[in-house]
């Protein structure tokens, strides 16, 4: 049984400035019970709106939301359960901690609203704060806490209810880089341990790949691709996904480059019209040599040494491509080099709509 | 180990007091001095064309047995209670309703300022007309709707006059209250409400757990000022009912005024100091209840 | 979405109620001022529109309506400007200079503003008699400045505190004196606040009644609120039409100001109450 089922969700807004805006278009998604599902996309793609619709804070203009075996929202039936009745928990980007309540009261709040027994509340609050390492902060107010601590309190408040579904809206965006990485691991561990169905929204593709069991990539209100991180990275459905996922981003070359190298391309590509296709190649798959064999000749315009990965910006016939190499020591800026790649690592896309040609 | 404190620089102190001089001067001469003067006067038997004579606390003792004085205290407190409560209630309701974006904002805002901007004296006469026995709108509506058989003499009965005064006062100050509460509401982050929705609260619960607590500082300040203003009320009553009928709507300030104009300055001064006292007590009461955080502005 | 629709209905109802609540009484006043007979609500009486009420009151010599208007405008304008000026000076010192009493003085001044006017006016009257200022402009302006200063101070304080002190430091390094800094840098930046303060004090003193009544005796210095409060008919019957015409006229300056400057006024009012 799927924990969450989104059927043809549409959401329209009417604004004074732009008239009717279609924030979500025919979204269909299935989330498996107990899995960590990530909604990934650039700002404005509608991922937060979708999350709000699952939570019940917002309602779809068309479509259905099913949690468990219960239809919690249906535009056609005009039925929309309040968040209260959906038994979902949510963590906002701003954490939304009640500033006038102590940490204890913040975490206890949902339990208090649900009229849980006082002794029960106490036990559960302490139970939840222990692993989150906030047990000694229970009497403090949010204003006295650091960003990381607030984040954990928000998390505590969400899971203390043992909800059916946990929703997280970019909870790590406000943390500094190091903290973010450690919290990522923490989150995943907690989710695994509690077997909590989780939907996580982010614009950070690295975060999505490291956290998600499955990832849905959204753009402009449409689902571009759904799959495991492995699928999304290695088998992108279109140009947008290919360029959005992976850092440094995939190089995209015009089809005319093809003409430079006949015979060393996949058969499928040879049959294509060079003017109508685009080639994608990840920086890590590009081989650079100072001498010897190579498909193209170019000159290094910039070298970025990043420690375990080094980037070479190479200018080829007016286009700049990025190559990631492990050892940049032998190269110099301005140097002429030969660039090569394995044809099996090439991705082909149709120029007019960005779709992948498989 | 000695902690070196940030010392004041004499130049700066001199400059500061220079800048403050005009304000301090005015405040001392036209507020402090008169109040002290009133205090002193209250200790004298000062009746017009009689020689003034120091009488100590005689005037105050006279207050304790003065029936009309106690009546005016009762009236004033009753008025304050009812009026402020009404303004708070209506102001809150309107603020909640208007908290969402509203079309025609500019026009609404001007409309809202009208009751506040009109001089009390003018609005008092306006309400005098509205509640008038023969020509008033209220009587017209009451008769039309069949709520009564004969026109009501609003200003002629103690309760009617009280009602008229409260309505006029609420009319004048509710819009002001609404604006202030509205601004306070706008300062509460929307995320808190969304979170509370997800946490399973109803609208009423959200109001009591989130809106009210976070609105407290604003509420306290607004209430403080309104209450003190209400205690001093004079203009409205003087013009609308003149304290009648039969002294039934005489507020403390009006009572003091009566004695000023009838020549008994000493007694009038004593009464006006009582007003001062009541206002002061209320202020202290408020500050105590809410703690000193508000004071740190 | 039923919930949304209910919300919208409530919202519109709320706005409609608010508008009616605020404007209806005054609309009524205007209607009466334009009618020959004030009891035109009765079916047997017709609503005769006329400007006679207005022309009567404006031309009546014994009414001195225009005198009252002039007095009010002058007194309030001068008091408002002076109050804002003094308050700006004080606000500058309080927000930028360190001196003993820095926190105490504003508090004390605020407390002063809460003194009941009745406790002040008695002795003030005696003072004014002694100074010979009864029924003069000066006799009203000075107390009005004092009444308006706390309000102006409140507003200027919040505007000044939002201006970074770094500007002052830069100007000091450039060789400016404190007065120059206030004049050339701070005030221009706080101009909207100064405007708000002046407007609010103007409206406040324009509407003031008790002091005006006690400290003036006739049309040479009397202000509009007093004038309208004492407006009686000749034969015991109040000429409602005339009265309402006077009411409308007295209110015109303030309503105009409110309409033109509504944003500033509201912002000024809020600055004090909300504080950021």
Image: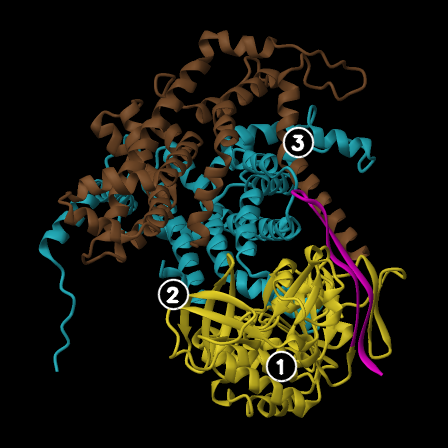
Chain colours: A yellow, B cyan, C brown
Indicate which label's residue lies in the foreground, 2 or 1.
Answer: 2
Q: Name the foreground residue: B134 vs B144.
A: B144
**Element at badge 3?**
helix
| Chain letter of disc 3 in the image | C
Q: CA distance from mark 2 to mark 3?
A: 81 Å
- The residue to which callout 1 is attached is A211
Q: CA distance from mark 2 to mark 1?
A: 40 Å
Question: Which quarter of the image is occupied by the N terminus of chain C?
Answer: bottom right
- The residue to which callout 3 is attached is C24
| Chain letter of disc 2 in the image | A
The magenta stretch spans residue A2: yes
Q: Is residue C222 visible?
A: no
Q: CA distance from mark 1 to mark 3?
A: 62 Å
**Element at badge 2?**
loop
The magenta stretch spans residue A287: no
In the image, residue B91 sits, relative to residue A51, either above or below, namely above
Image-quadrant location for residue C224: top left
Q: Is residue B148 visible?
A: yes
Instruction: Name which residue lies at 56% across and 28% down.
Output: B125
Could you tell me residue A308's position as x and y percent? 45, 83
How crowded pointer 1 is (Cα within 10 Å; few <14, some 14-19, many 20+) is rated as some
How crowded pointer 3 is (Cα within 10 Å; few <14, some 14-19, many 20+) is rated as few
Q: Which residues are magenta?
A: A1-30
Could you tell me residue B189's position as x and y percent? 56, 61
């Amino acid at each position: 049984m799927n924990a969450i089922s989104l059927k043809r969700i549409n959401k329209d807004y009417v604004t004074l400035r732009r008239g009717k805006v279609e924030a979500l278009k025919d979204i269909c998604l299935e989330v498996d019970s107990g899995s960590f599902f990530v909604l990934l996309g650039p700002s404005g793609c509608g991922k937060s709106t979708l999350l709000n619709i699952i939570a019940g804070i917002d309602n779809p203009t068309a479509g259905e939301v099913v949690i468990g075996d219960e239809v919690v929202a249906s535009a056609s039936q005009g039925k929309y359960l309040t968040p209260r009745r959906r038994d979902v928990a949510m963590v906002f980007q701003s954490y939304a901690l009640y500033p006038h309540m102590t940490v204890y009261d913040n975490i206890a709040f949902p339990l208090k609203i649900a009229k849980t027994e006082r002794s029960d509340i106490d036990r559960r609050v302490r139970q939840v704060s222990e692993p989150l390492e906030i047990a000694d902060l229970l009497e403090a107010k949010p204003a006295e806490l650091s960003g990381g601590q607030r984040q954990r309190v928000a998390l505590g408040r969400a899971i203390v209810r043992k909800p059916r579904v946990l929703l997280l809206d970019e909870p790590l965006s406000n943390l500094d880089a190091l903290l973010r990485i450690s919290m990522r691991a923490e989150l995943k561990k907690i989710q695994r341990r509690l077997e909590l169905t989780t939907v996580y929204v982010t614009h950070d593709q690295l975060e999505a790949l490291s956290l998600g069991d499955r990832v849905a990539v959204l753009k402009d209100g449409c689902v571009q691709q759904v799959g495991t991180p492995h699928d999304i990275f290695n088998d992108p459905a279109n140009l947008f996904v290919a360029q959005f996922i992976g850092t440094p981003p995939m190089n995209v070359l015009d089809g005319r480059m093809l003409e430079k190298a006949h015979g060393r391309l996949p058969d499928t590509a040879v049959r294509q019209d060079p003017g109508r296709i685009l080639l994608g190649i990840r920086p890590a798959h590009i081989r650079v040599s100072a001498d010897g064999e190579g498909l193209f000749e170019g000159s290094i315009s910039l070298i970025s040494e990043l420690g375990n990965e080094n980037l070479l910006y190479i200018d080829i016939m007016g286009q700049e491509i990025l190559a990631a190499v492990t050892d940049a020591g032998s190269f110099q800026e301005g140097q002429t080099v030969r660039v090569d790649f394995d044809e099996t690592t090439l991705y082909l896309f149709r120029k007019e709509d960005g779709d992948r040609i498989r | 180990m000695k902690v070196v404190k940030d010392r004041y620089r004499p130049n700066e102190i001199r400059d500061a007091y220079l800048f403050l001089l005009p304000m301090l001067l005015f405040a001392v001469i036209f507020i402090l001095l008169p109040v002290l003067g009133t205090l002193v006067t209250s200790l004298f038997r000062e009746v017009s064309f009689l020689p003034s004579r120091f009488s100590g606390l005689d005037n105050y003792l006279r207050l304790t047995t003065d029936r009309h004085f106690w009546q005016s205290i009762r009236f004033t407190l009753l008025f304050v209670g009812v009026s402020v409560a009404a303004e708070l209630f209506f102001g809150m309701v309107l603020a909640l309703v208007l908290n969402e974006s509203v079309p025609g904002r500019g026009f609404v805002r001007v409309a809202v300022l009208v009751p506040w901007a009109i001089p009390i004296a003018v609005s008092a006469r306006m309400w005098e007309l509205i509640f008038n026995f023969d020509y008033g709108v209220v009587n017209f509506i009451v008769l039309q709707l069949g709520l009564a058989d004969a026109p009501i003499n609003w200003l002629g009965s103690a309760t009617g006059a009280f009602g008229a005064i409260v309505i006029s006062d609420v009319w004048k100050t509710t819009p002001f209250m609404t604006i202030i509460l509205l601004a306070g509401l706008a300062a509460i982050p929307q995320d808190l409400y969304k979170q509370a929705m997800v946490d399973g609260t109803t609208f009423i619960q959200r109001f009591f757990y989130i809106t009210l607590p976070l609105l407290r500082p604003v509420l306290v300040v607004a209430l403080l000022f309104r209450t003190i203003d209400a205690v001093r009320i004079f203009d409205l009553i003087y013009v609308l009912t003149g304290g009648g009928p039969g002294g039934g709507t005489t507020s403390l300030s009006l009572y003091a005024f009566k004695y000023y104009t009838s020549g008994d300055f000493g007694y009038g001064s004593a009464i006006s100091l009582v007003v001062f006292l009541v206002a002061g007590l209320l202020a202290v009461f408020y500050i105590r209840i809410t703690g000193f955080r508000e004071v740190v502005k | 979405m039923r919930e949304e629709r209910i919300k919208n209905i409530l919202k519109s109802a709320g706005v409609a109620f608010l508008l009616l609540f605020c404007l209806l009484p005054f609309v009524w006043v205007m209607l009466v001022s334009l009618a020959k007979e004030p009891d035109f609500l009765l079916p047997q009486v017709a609503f005769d529109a006329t400007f006679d009420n207005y022309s009567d009151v404006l031309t009546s010599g014994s009414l001195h309506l225009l005198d009252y208007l002039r007095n009010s405008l002058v007194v309030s304008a001068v008091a408002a400007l002076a109050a804002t000026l003094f308050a700006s000076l004080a606000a500058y010192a309080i927000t930028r200079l360190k001196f003993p009493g820095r926190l105490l003085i504003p508090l004390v001044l605020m407390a002063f503003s809460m003194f009941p006017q009745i406790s002040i006016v008695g002795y003030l009257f005696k003072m004014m008699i002694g100074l010979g200022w009864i029924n003069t402009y000066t006799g009203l302006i000075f107390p009005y400045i004092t009444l308006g200063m706390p309000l102006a101070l409140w507003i200027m304080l919040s505007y000044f505190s939002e201006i970074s002190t770094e500007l002052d430091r830069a100007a000091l390094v450039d060789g400016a004196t404190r007065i120059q800094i206030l004049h050339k840098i701070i005030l221009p930046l706080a101009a909207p606040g100064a405007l708000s303060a002046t407007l609010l004090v103007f409206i406040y003193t324009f509407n003031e009644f008790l002091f005006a009544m006690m400290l003036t005796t006739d049309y040479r210095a009397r202000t509009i609120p007093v004038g309208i409060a004492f407006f009686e008919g000749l034969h015991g019957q109040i000429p409602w039409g005339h009265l309402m015409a006077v009411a409308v006229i007295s209110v015109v300056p303030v309503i105009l100001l409110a309409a033109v400057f509504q944003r500033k006024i509201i912002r000024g009012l809020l600055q004090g109450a909300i504080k950021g």
